[in-house]
Image (cartoon, grey):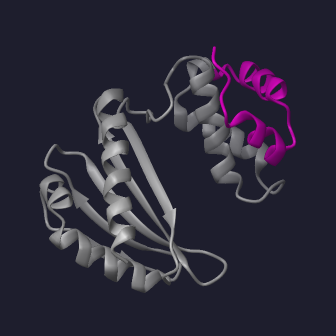
């Protein structure tokens, strides 16, 4: 099996080697468990030991599922695919979302994708623009704060049916994001 690029960061963050994680997975008979069941058991191990235990439990679980061939990179537990593109900006979180919403309303490539009116919601932690795509997949654009008062734009396209569609969507979104950033 091809080495997973996440393993090094998983080992560093969890302070357990990949071999130790594989032994743990064997001890819980992880191959017979669902994604949720595996992640819950990993979370029990990590809880109160590291920062962001839920995120790392998901990372360990996904890396394991890729390791055993249950899924490939970008594939979700339901078999669909998800891609993301993110870029840092010099704008603050609200300004970034305002610019994105205005851009998306006029951009022909974005308009060609969306099948329903986008919804924008937010908290102090992030502002989210969501829309259903014409093909039934989901689009989520997030304005996330960075430590220096600026924000990053994170594009997530979920529910894609094939790896090929996922790769094409990633390239398409990279072009859209580049065009968006250029006009800022």
- Residue drawn at x 51%, y 31% as measured from the top left: 73
Give the magenta-colored segment's residue range. 1-30
Residue 163 showing in the rendered view: yes
Task: Name the spot of residue 108 as percent of width and height, x first.
Answer: 14, 61
Front residue of 18/84: it is: 84
Which residue shows up at 21% across the image and 59% down it? 110
Main SS of the magenta segment? helix
Q: Which of 174 and 23 is in front in this view?
A: 174
Q: Report if residue 38 is visible in the image.
A: no
x and y, in percent, of residue 146 in the image: 61, 75
- Quarter of the image for residue 119 reads bottom left
Q: Quadrant of residue 77?
A: top left
Q: Establish if 179 lies above or below 16.
A: below
Q: Where is residue 14 in the image (x, y as percent from the top left)?
A: 81, 44
Q: Is residue 108 left or right of residue 45?
A: left
Magenta stretch contains residue 21: yes
Q: Is residue 66 above or below residue 102?
A: above
User: Does the segment drawn in magenta span residue 32?
Assistant: no
Name the quarter where the N terminus is drawn.
top right
Image-based side of 183 in relation to 153, left or right: left
- Determine whether 9 is above or below 79 in the image: below
Q: How many labels does the image show?
A: 0
* Residue 8 quadrant: top right
Name the residue located 63 percent from the left edge and 21 percent from the top edge: 67
Residue for point 50% across, 73% down: 89
58 is higher (above) or lower (below) than 121: above
């Amino acid at each position: 099996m091809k080495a997973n690029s996440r393993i090094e960061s998983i080992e560093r963050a969890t302070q357990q080697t990949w071999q130790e994680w594989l032994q743990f997975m064997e001890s819980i008979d992880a191959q017979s468990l669902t994604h949720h069941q595996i992640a819950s058991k990993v979370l029990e191990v990590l809880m109160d030991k590291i920062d962001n235990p839920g995120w790392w439990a998901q990372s360990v679980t996904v890396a394991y599922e890729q390791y055993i061939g249950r899924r490939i990179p970008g594939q979700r537990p339901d078999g669909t695919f998800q891609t993301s593109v993110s870029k840092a900006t010099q704008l603050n979180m609200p300004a970034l979302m305002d610019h994105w919403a205005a851009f998306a309303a006029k951009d022909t490539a974005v308009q060609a994708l969306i099948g329903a009116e986008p919804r924008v919601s937010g908290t102090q932690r992030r502002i989210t623009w969501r829309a259903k795509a014409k093909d039934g997949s989901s689009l989520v654009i997030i304005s996330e704060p960075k430590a220096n008062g600026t924000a990053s734009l994170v594009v997530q396209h979920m529910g894609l049916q094939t790896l090929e569609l996922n790769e094409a969507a990633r390239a398409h979104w990279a072009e859209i994001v580049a065009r968006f950033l250029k006009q800022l």
